[in-house]
Image: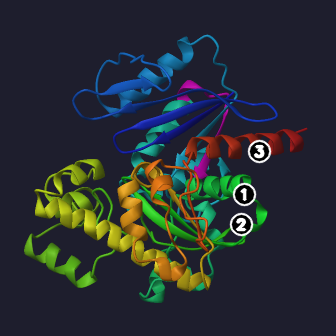
Amino acid sequence: MILTINGGSSSIKFAIYKKGKVLEKIYSGELKRIGLPGMTFTLKGSNKNISCIGDDYISAMSCLVKWLKETNDIQITAIGHRVVHGMQYTEPSLITPKLIKALKEIIPYDPDHLPGEIKLIEAFLEHYPRIKQFACFDTAYHQTMPPVAKLLPIPHRFAQMGIHRYGFHGLSYQYLTNELEKQAGKKAAHGRIVLAHLGNGASLAAVYKGKSMDTSMGFTPAGGIPMSSRSGDIDPGVAWIMMKTESLSPKQFNHLVNHESGLLGISGTSGDMNDLLKQEAKDEHSAEAVNLFCYQVKKWIGAFAAALGGIDTLVFAGGIGENSPVIRARICKGLNFLGIELDEKRNQQNAPLISEDKSSVSVRVIPTDEEFMIAAIVAKMVKTINKTTP
């Protein structure tokens, strides 16, 4: 069995897959509100909430490990960890002391993700010291981007430090690319595709022949379109004014653009799209937040259609992309010049195919599954290691 760990700043998602001809999901769940009052541990597909003592990250990890060891039918043979940013480390890797040391050295480049992810890795190494564990990097999928798409317009000395556009949500995009081929065939999967992973964290990717050509996020996951509490791209001059006006330290500025901005910053009340849609009719700022989100996603779709020389398929995924017909409709409105035309009934039903039959662009809704992708990567790596180990 393969255990997958997907840690966020206030949550830990996990899943357990049984290896066979195909990967079979046995369990999955999530610990939410870590570090906040009322931390919960929920098993998906069940009404069971597991009781945990404490509410910090260490307590959450201890609670999960305790449950894993007390559940009799779970026998873990490998563990896969999602790691958002690894700088020069981009390919899936066996976790070693050398890798952990390298990840700790680059914490200043990703202070919002790496500290928690490293804590998770070290905790599971402590509890499962004899089990092979792997880091699956969110940046790996985008290594096929052409050099021009990776460049940042800053002095070259920064590029020599490894500062360039990496792109994120790679595990999701790899899953969506594979799933599109299963649903629509190889020809569609190798065409000109725009993938829109729209959730609390949101980005888009331009894909051709199954490979990433460009993506909206850049050096960090704070770039690109506005998100739940992340700013997305902002004018560097605005950043300077913000820091100067409020005498912000680098750490404070980082917190501002990652945790106080985006939809939350514009609305002043919530970064949750469902909340904003409920409030928009009577709250001007909520309406502004929704409108900006849809406008920016639409703009990136157009930009990527230009970068790809056209568009054959548009895929929506993520919490918003999979579950919000009204947002999908607003994003696609006016894109008929690209060949994008939605079928209103299909869209309302969250159908797998939501474009009209006459539409020259296929518009699809594909639920993403990062945990499955981690498990698939780990299964492949374990198989490779077993073949090469005498």
Choose between 93 and 70: the one closer to the eye: 70
Q: Residues within 10 Å of mark 3 (few under 14, many from 20)?
A: few
In the image, residue 372 above or below residue 102? above
Left or right of 336? Residue 211 is right
Residue 74 figure quarter? top right
Residue type at mark 1: give it: Glu
Residue 3 figure quarter? top right
Q: Residues within 10 Å of mark 1 (few under 14, many from 20)?
A: some
Residue type at mark 3: give it: Lys
Please report contact status of discs 1 and 2: CB closer than 8 Å, yes or no: yes
Q: Is residue 308 visible?
A: yes
Nearest-to-viewer mark from 3 and 2: 2
Residue occupied by mark 1: 181
Please report contact status of discs 3 and 2: CB closer than 8 Å, yes or no: no
| Residue 224 picture location, percent across and down | 39, 71
Residue type at mark 2: give it: Ala
Left or right of 158? Residue 143 is right
- Specify the segment rendered in magenta: 126-137
Q: Secondary structure at mark 2?
A: helix
Q: Is residue 222 visible?
A: no
Residue occupied by mark 2: 188
